[in-house]
Image (tube, rainbow, N blue to C red):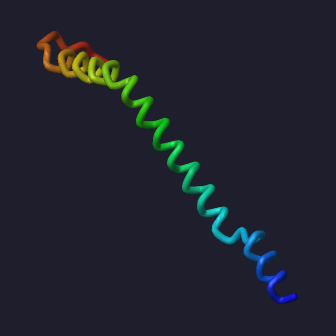
Amino acid sequence: MRVQTTLYSLRHRQEGQGLVEYGLIIASIAILLIVAMLFLAGKIDRLFSNTGTSVSKPGPLTPG
């Protein structure tokens, strides 16, 4: 009887399941962010380059 109880408890133990699920969710989000950054890298680079060029150009000051 005790062997059956032990086997049943081993098959139905779910103590670490939540932690593993959270780890998988975090890993999935991290992978999605990395892929998004790879696709957007060129656009982000151009945005900063254009902003830097605009800031460094001399021009008249306009009241703001």
Residue 39 occupies quadrant:
top left
Instruction: Give residue 19's position: percent from left, percent from top.
Output: 60, 63
Q: Tell me: residue 26, above or below residue 11.
A: above
Toward the viewer: 6 or 59? 6
What residue is rendered at 14% in x and 19% in y?
56
- Specify the farthest residue to the left: 58
- Residue at figure coordinates x 62%, y 56% from the top left: 21
Q: Residue at x 44, y 29 (%)?
A: 36
Identify the residue shown where x is 77% and y is 77%.
Answer: 7
* Spot occupied by residue 17 in the image (x, y as percentages of width and height): 66, 63
Number of labels in the image equals: 0
Q: Quadrant of the N terminus?
A: bottom right
Q: Is residue 9 left or right of residue 35?
A: right
Q: Quadrant of residue 22?
A: bottom right
Q: Judge from the rendering whether residue 41 lies leftward or rightward of residue 32; answer left or right.
A: left
Quarter in which the C terminus is drawn: top left
Would you place residue 56 above or below residue 29 in this image?
Answer: above
In the image, residue 16 lies at what x, y percent? 64, 68
Question: With respect to residue 21, does 44 lie above or below?
Answer: above
- Depth check: 58 or 30 in front? 30
In the rendered structure, the answer to whether residue 44 lies left or right of residue 31 reads left
Residue extending furthest toward the right = 1
